[in-house]
Image: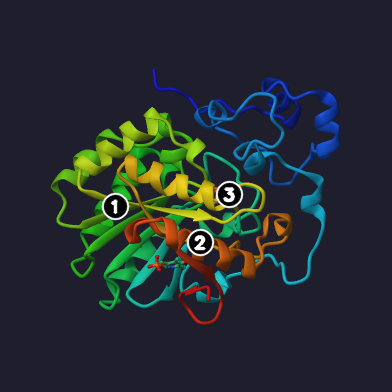
Amino acid sequence: MQTQTNMTDTPQALCKTLQLNPKTVQSLKVDLNSPFPLKVPKDFLAQIQLNDPTDPLLKQVLPLKIEHQTADGFSQDPVSDLAFNPTPSLIHKYHGRVLLIASPKCDIHCRYCFRRHFPYSEQTNTRHWKKALDYIAQNPSIHEVILSGGDPMSLSEKSLVQLIEKIEAIPHIKTLRIHSRTPVVAPSKAPTQALIAWAKQTRLHKVLVVHCNHANELSPQTAKLFSLYKEAGFHLLNQSVLLKDINDQVSILENLSHALFSQGVLPYYLNQLDRVQGAAHFEVDRHTALNLHNQLRKCLSGYLLPNLVQDTSNPFYKVPIT
Ligand SMILES: *Cc1c(COP(=O)(O)O)cnc(C)c1O
Ligand code: SF4
């Protein structure tokens, strides 16, 4: 039987499972009724330390009341994706590549996520795929399709491969890129057989960008999964989000790069937080971010140094932070 992602349904249940003492839980001001509810896959849960309210993985998933605070400059669509939306579920903002929102769902709910307010219901119906594919087919300047979400790997493997085959059928597409957090947070749920069978025979270049913020998220299960994708011809890259009190230390980021590399993954982007409402308490200020990155540059081989970038609405690329 396939292993199910077993949700720990409520923040109370999660705290109990993690043996956090009730007083600590109270002082954390946990939000029991968040509109963006708690969601933690069991593989990720297994990587969280017991009885540690400061655990860097726990902090990424536990809903807190502080998320209700509004902060200047934090909005619902911080990267203006909705302004570059030629057809529902497609974002064409960058030259040569489009982003297709392949699934509204994720296997995990990351508290800092910039898509927490995204109008998924209007954007992600599979009905929209045909129009999106038509748009891509009519634009020969597009050579790369990026599957994103939500998380494309939260689709059934069959739907995912069907979608990919339709993309492959467009002659001017050369590269398929999948952006997914599933291989890191729920390796036991990630697609393997059909995707790998497809990957081994396709004409397309294949890139898988995973999303890992801390070395503790990696395990023997992630290593095994990454090696399957690698053998099937995927280039493996990682993006992280710089998060206050989670990974905003040189030693943590240095470890992360080494841990990723030891599992066959190269660091790609270290993203400055998108300024989304409810996530202000995760923000690392620009000066600190730059300082961290400069220190990392000294201790990491060049190919292990992620690009520190900020996604903004203008200009239309991930802007290096300087
Ligand atoms: C990040 C992003 C891309 C891809 O950018 P790269 O720099 O190629 O990784 C494309 N489209 C959208 C909407 C994006 O946010
Ligand atoms: S997996 Fe990615 S898209 Fe989904 S909640 Fe986390 S950061 Fe957001």
Give coordinates of residue 32: x percent, y percent. Answer: 79, 36
Regarding mark 3 in the picture, which secondary structure is present there? loop
Of pointers 3 and 2, the one earlier in the residue sequence = 3
Give coordinates of residue 43: x percent, y percent. Answer: 50, 28
Identity, as a three-letter code, of the amino acid under mark 2? Gln
Give coordinates of residue 280: x percent, y percent. Answer: 72, 59
Task: Please state which of residues 269 and 101 is positioned toward the viewer in this rendering.
Answer: 269
In front: label 1 or label 2: 2
Q: Is mark 2 within 8 Å of ligand 1?
A: no
In front: label 3 or label 1: 3
Q: CA distance from mark 3 to mark 2?
A: 14 Å
Residue beneath label 1, please? Answer: 164
Its colouring scheme is: rainbow
Residue beneath label 3, please? Answer: 247
Question: Above or below — where is 188 with respect to 162?
Answer: above
Mark carried by residue 66: none
The residue depicted at 55 percent of the width and 25 percent of the height is 6
Residue beneath label 2, please? Answer: 295
The reply, left or right, for residue 307 in relation to residue 161 is right
Identity, as a three-letter code, of the amino acid under mark 1? Ile
